[in-house]
Structures are given as C-alpha cells and as structure tokens.
Amino acid sequence: MIEKFGPFAPNDLRMRAAADGWGFDDLIVSRVRAAAPGAAVRKISYSREQLAQGRDTPLIFRFTDSTKDFVRQVSAGADCDRYVMVHRHGGKGVFGIGIAKFTSSLVNRTFLYALMYVRVYDGRTFELIKQGPARIDDEPTLSQAFASPGGPYRVVDDRSFPTSREEAVANPMFRETIRGLLTASLDKTLPAMLRPSAKETPR
C-alpha cells in the first residue's frame, strides 16, 4: 500500500502496488521453519481464485473464526499437525504492508510498515489454538500519539515517499526494510505461538 493522509481530506492518497517479486511468502515460510526446529515445515499454495473466494466471504480476513474455512479449504489433503496462517493486519489508519506519509500542521512523518497477524490451527479439528499480531516490541506511549501505525514500522526520509507504484516497487531500500520488519516481528512472535502448551500432547 502507498498512502498519504492527514486532517485535510484533499491531501489523502491511497493506491496499491504489486510487490510479487519481494519474496514475502518464502520469507514467512523460512521464519516459521526457524521457529519450529525439528519440524517438517512446508508452504501450502493456493490459487488466486481460492483467495478471491475467501475474500468474498464476509470478514474472512478479520478477527473471526471464519478464516478456519479458508484454511480447511486450501489445506485439503495436506495432513499436517498444525497450520500456520500469516496474513495482513490493520493498524491505525493503515493495513498490511506499505509506506505511509502523515501530514499535518504539527507533524510530518513518513514510515514503512509491515502489519501481520498470525493464527495457528489444529491440523485435525482446525480449531484455533493461538493467535495474535506479529510485533517487535510494544511502542512507547509517545510514539503511539504521533502518527505511528500501531505495529512494526521504520521512519524514513519524507523525500523518499514515492510518486508512483513503479517507483515504490523498484526501491531496494523499501524492499529490504520491509523484509527486515517482517523477519524481526515473526522471529519475535512465532516461537511462543508454535511452542506446545502444557495441555497439548505432541503427535
């Protein structure tokens, strides 16, 4: 996402850019694998049609158990003990992965962000075992008050804000910073989520 917002609506901007070549899927799989040493971890692919169908289901990517149906559908026949779903998440005025510029009479701030949510499902019953946002650290109170996204982010120079989708996708600094945010937040969040609880019996 490429967004510019503030208290004056005429200045707002919101557009999507395709970053298929940035390798997010493989990066996420590698972090799950690192968080579950000794386990056989593999990526379950799904088609654009399955994803579109899931998005047509009300609230499929919000905080409801309706995501279970999507996981059950795309994992049919996989026969895994656990299914880990990592998807985009909403913060304060932003969603998913992107760059945002907040402008006002008091504050101008540009930041890259990577807001993701993790859900872990039982491989037999598809019941939700654990869930939560992928975080690096809790933001200081002062930071929360001044145009931060409410999740992993890095402030960048205002002059780096792109003027087009093509410019955003071609910027290597954007790519590496966002990949770094994803890595750091997943490495902080996944180990505890994938650790069996006292009530669970390893299979």
Image (cartoon, helix red, strand yellow):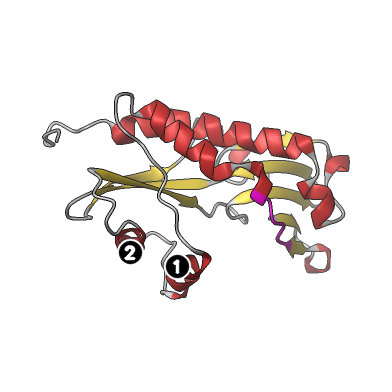
In terms of depth relative to the viewer, which is nearer, 12 or 123? 123
Label 2 packing within 10 angstroms: few (<14), some (14-19), many (20+): few
Q: Is residue 16 magenta?
A: yes
- Image point 57% across, 38% down: which residue? 152
Q: Secondary structure at mark 1?
A: helix
- Image point 48% across, 63% down: which residue? 47
Residue type at mark 1: give it: Gln
Span highlighted in magenta in the image: 15-20
- Asked if one can make out residue 21 in the rendered structure from this viewpoint, the answer is yes
The image shows residue 69, relative to residue 18, as above or below, that is below
Residue 73: image tag:
2
- Image point 11% across, 34% down: which residue? 201
Q: Residue furthest front?
A: 77
- Asked if one can make out residue 142 in the rendered structure from this viewpoint, the answer is no
Query: Which of the 4 image quadrants contains residue 10?
Result: bottom right
In terms of depth relative to the viewer, which is nearer, 36 or 154? 36
Contact check, label 1 and label 2, Cβ < 8 Å: yes
Work out which quarter of the rendered image holds the C terminus and state it: top left
Q: CA distance from mark 1 to mark 2?
A: 8 Å
- Image point 30% across, 34% down: which residue? 194
Rendered location of residue 167, percent (x, y): 84, 49
According to the picture, the residue beneath numbered tag 1 turns out to be 50
Q: Earlier in the sequence, mark 1 or mark 2?
A: 1
Left or right: 22, with 135 as reference point? right
In terms of depth relative to the viewer, which is nearer, 152 or 9? 152
